[in-house]
Image (cartoon, grey):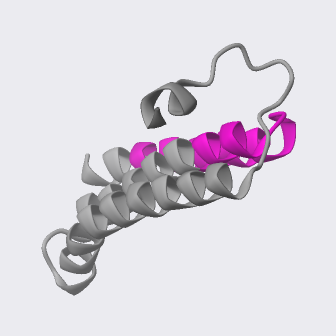
Amino acid sequence: MNDMAAIILISVGVLFNIFGSIGLIRLPDMYNRLQAATKCVTLGCCSILLGVLVHYGFGSAGFRALVAIPILFFTATVAAHALVRGAYHFGTKLDEKSVKDDYREAVK
């Protein structure tokens, strides 16, 4: 039963990573691409690490996966925020299809 749960978690993680990669290719501007990469790949990697934890239990590999999940979650979101903020202040334009610039309104 644990092996099946691990396979399902790892497969879901791989699918999230694939969707994040597709988002990097298909989305129009840097801000949308970074959102796809951050959300999908973070959830995908956390799901893969959770599958490793389920498969190996609380041994050496499972404990490392358990420690890596919150580290990955928090560092990826903070790094994405810093990259978007830096790109915005550097002057990277939104795509012309973007409807609203929430960050410009928040800065004022």
- Furthest-front residue in this view: 108
Q: Could you tell me how many numbered marks the image carries? A: 0
Q: Residue at x 29, y 69 (%)?
A: 71
Quarter occupied by residue 19: top right
Q: Residue at x 62, y 40 (%)?
A: 36
x then y, percent, for residue 68: 29, 72
Q: Nearer the viewer, residue 55 or 63?
A: 63
Q: Nearer the viewer, residue 73 or 13?
A: 73
Q: Main secondary structure of the magenta part?
A: helix
- Furthest-top residue in this view: 99
In the image: residue 17, left or right of residue 97: left
Examine the rendered structure and indicate whether residue 93 appears above or below residue 38. Answer: above
Q: Residue at x 75, y 51 (%)?
A: 91
Q: Which residues are magenta?
A: 8-37
Q: Is residue 65 visible?
A: yes
Does the magenta segment cover residue 32?
yes
In the image: residue 11, left or right of residue 47: right
Q: Nearer the viewer, residue 82 or 14?
A: 82
Does the magenta segment cover residue 96?
no
x then y, percent, for residue 27: 80, 34
Examine the rendered structure and indicate whether residue 58 appears above or below residue 46. Answer: below
In the image: residue 12, left or right of residue 98: left
In the image: residue 21, left or right of residue 52: right
Q: Nearer the viewer, residue 88 or 57?
A: 88
x then y, percent, for residue 72: 37, 66
- Furthest-left residue in this view: 58
x then y, percent, for residue 3: 34, 54
Q: Is residue 10 visible?
A: no
